[in-house]
Image (cartoon, helix red, strand yellow):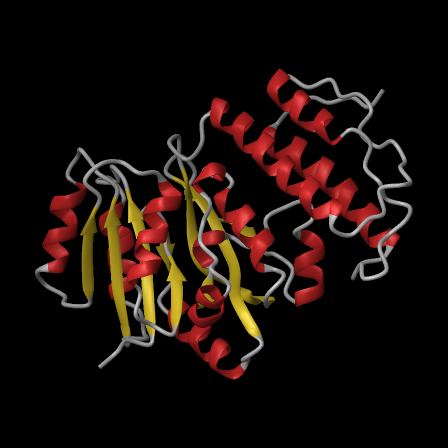
Amino acid sequence: MTPLVSVVMPAYNREKYIEESIKSILNQTYNNFEFIIVDDGSTDDTEKIINTYKDKDNRIVYIKNEKNMGISKTRNRGMDEAKGKYIAIMDSDDISLPERLEKQVKYMEENGNCGIVGSGFLSFSDDNPQEMPNMRPIDNHNIKLHSLFCSPFGNPTCMLRKSVIDENNLRYNSKYDGAEDFEFFHRAKHFMEFHNLPEFLLRYRIHGKNISLKSRAKQAMLSNKIYERALREIIDEDFYIPVFTKLELTLPEIKESFNTLGEIPLMKLKENCPFSRKEISYACGMHMKNITDRMNLPNKYI
């Protein structure tokens, strides 16, 4: 029987966490799935742990890259192998709550216009196990407004409608590794509706290997390229008002990245723009607050 859901999980040197992640999928209340785990050339005991569970559960499909290919190519390889009607994204250090697949399948089956459904998630760390709630906008309009300056989903909470993904040749772009999910959603939003379930269906682990300071700078620069692309799709570039004229930031790479945007045009929108000036101005302000808060950087508008 062809599985209705393909869970795709890339893994690279995750011996410390992957067992808990695997268990969280195998113990789902929904059972009609295949579990595709793609090992991106791990050098620790990741492969050994995966094979231990593969020998016990025939829903696991194990694929190993001959060499390390990076997150985008590894995730794409799993998506290419997927046989299900839906693809559930999963990361090898996170924990899906037991009813995640059941609730997302039910929603997708009842909402044929939805191409991607995510959910809220609970952030935690080994040093601080207290869970911090993170809820994204729920309806299509507000999710896409949110996506002008921030990723609209927690990527490992997402379930994708495979037919829409395949019909529009949507895969992750390795040139954006570090912000590949945000760039994927930027392209996907043109072909489908985005929804988020108003509940927490995943525990998202924060640890030292998530992202380094250097990676934060790279991620910020890549993200700002996506912000600029998104804005140019909806505004008339003949009229500008200065928003980011000069920033004093701790990391020079991030300062350079923000200055790439220069003056953001807000006042004159294209006729087909789905957002009001007020909405875009609000999103712009929230972006600046969120990025500086999240990165704990001093900033000054001059």
Left or right: residue 249 compared with residue 63: right
Residue 58 percent location from the top left of the image: 14, 67
Q: Nearer the viewer, residue 294 or 213?
A: 213
Residue 218 percent location from the top left of the image: 53, 28
Image quadrant where one finds the C terminus: top right
**Is residue 126 something that shows in the picture?**
yes
Q: Name above or below for residue 274 compared with residue 104.
A: above
**Is residue 251 something that shows in the picture?**
no
Left or right: residue 126 compared with residue 300: left
For residue 225, what is the image quadrant? Answer: top right
Residue at image coords 11%, 52%: 51
Left or right: residue 6 compared with residue 181: left
Residue 220 percent location from the top left of the image: 59, 32
Image quadrant where one finds the N terminus: bottom left
Q: How many marks?
A: 0
Left or right: residue 286 compared with residue 257: right
For residue 166, what is the image quadrant? Answer: bottom left
Residue 8 percent location from the top left of the image: 32, 58
Residue at image coords 17%, 34%: 44
Residue at image coords 54%, 52%: 133
